């Protein structure tokens, strides 16, 4: 069943709850809605109450203008507040970056895990003006170009891979998320690990895949280093992904840690 909460600015935010046990709110990354991480949700729901929600502008949620990262933080806070118990949060990719900013802003979380928030170092940063270019493409209804820009500049896919993706059925779904790619660009900001993460007091686990690129591995290390007491673990996986049957046991151990 789909439930709805109202964010601070009145925007309706849709969410679903599956399973029993401690509540784990999952924050999706770019080009995903609440259905995008189904294998992970199914694995978590065997042990926890897995909650997925549509970030603003996606699925059944609203999209009140103007957008700001602060509004997205308020959206997550509204979902967390819908439960009368301590809530765990798991953020994926740019959703992890959003969850980290929310924790730094004081959104209450019992524990927070993030998977490969796509921050970059001095030598591996998103091209200057990426967010502005993305905004211009979306405003001009050039959604195909916006998705291509995201794949090449943010993900690091070669032009050949983008061309191949355009020929697949998944392209139409990717294209539908084009307006919200601007939002994710703003969440990541200048692509550096934000200084405000040093104020996080929530216990944090940072996870990355050993099959990811060097810059994503470096990002995980830098993220963990920026957060007092954060733990970092690398798991066997592929590029920007770890199979749920490997990831969830690691998350479960962290979530149930009494310390």
Image (cartoon, helix red, strand yellow):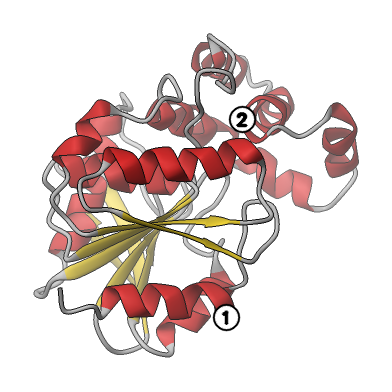
Q: Are marks 2 and 1 in contact (CB under 8 Å)?
A: no
- Which quadrant holds the C terminus? bottom left
Give the label on residue 88, or none.
none
Q: Position of residue 69 (x, y in %)?
A: 30, 31
**Mark 1, residues whose alpha carbon is within 10 Å: few (<14), some, or many (≥20)?**
few
Residue at the (31%, 29%) spot, across then down? 194
Regarding mark 1 in the picture, which secondary structure is present there? helix
Residue at the (58%, 18%) spot, across then down? 123
Residue 1 visible to the viewer: no
Regarding mark 2 in the picture, which secondary structure is present there? helix
Could you tell me how many numbered marks the image carries?
2
Q: Position of residue 132 (x, y in %)?
A: 51, 12
Q: Is residue 219 above or below residue 259?
A: above
Q: Which residue is mark 2?
A: 154
Question: Relative to the observer, which residue lies in front, 119 or 73?
Answer: 119
Residue at the (42%, 47%) spot, across then down? 95
Q: Position of residue 150 (x, y in %)?
A: 64, 30
Residue at the (36%, 79%) spot, across then down? 252
């Amino acid at each position: 069943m789909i439930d709805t909460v109202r964010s601070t600015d009145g925007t309706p935010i849709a969410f679903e709850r599956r399973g029993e046990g401690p509540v784990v709110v999952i924050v999706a990354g770019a080009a995903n809605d609440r259905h995008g991480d189904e294998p992970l949700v199914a694995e978590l729901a065997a042990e926890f109450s897995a909650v997925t929600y549509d970030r603003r502008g996606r699925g059944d949620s609203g999209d009140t203008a103007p957008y700001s990262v602060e509004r997205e933080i308020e959206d997550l806070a509204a979902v967390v507040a819908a439960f009368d118990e301590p809530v765990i949060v798991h953020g994926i990719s740019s959703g992890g970056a959003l969850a980290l900013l929310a924790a730094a802003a004081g959104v209450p979380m019992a524990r927070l895990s993030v998977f490969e928030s796509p921050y970059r170092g001095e030598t591996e940063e998103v091209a200057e003006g990426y967010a502005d270019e993305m905004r211009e493409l979306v405003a001009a209804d050039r959604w195909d170009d916006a998705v291509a820009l995201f794949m090449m500049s943010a993900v690091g896919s070669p032009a050949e891979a983008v061309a191949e993706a355009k020929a697949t059925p998944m392209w139409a779904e990717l294209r539908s998320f084009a307006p919200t790619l601007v939002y994710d660009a703003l969440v990541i900001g200048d692509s550096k690990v934000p200084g405000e993460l040093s104020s996080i007091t929530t216990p944090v686990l940072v996870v990355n895949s050993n099959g990811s690129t060097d810059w994503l591995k470096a990002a995980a290390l830098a993220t963990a280093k920026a957060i007092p007491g954060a733990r970092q673990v690398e798991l066997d996986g592929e590029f920007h992904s770890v199979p749920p049957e490997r990831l969830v046991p690691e998350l479960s151990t962290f979530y149930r840690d009494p310390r």
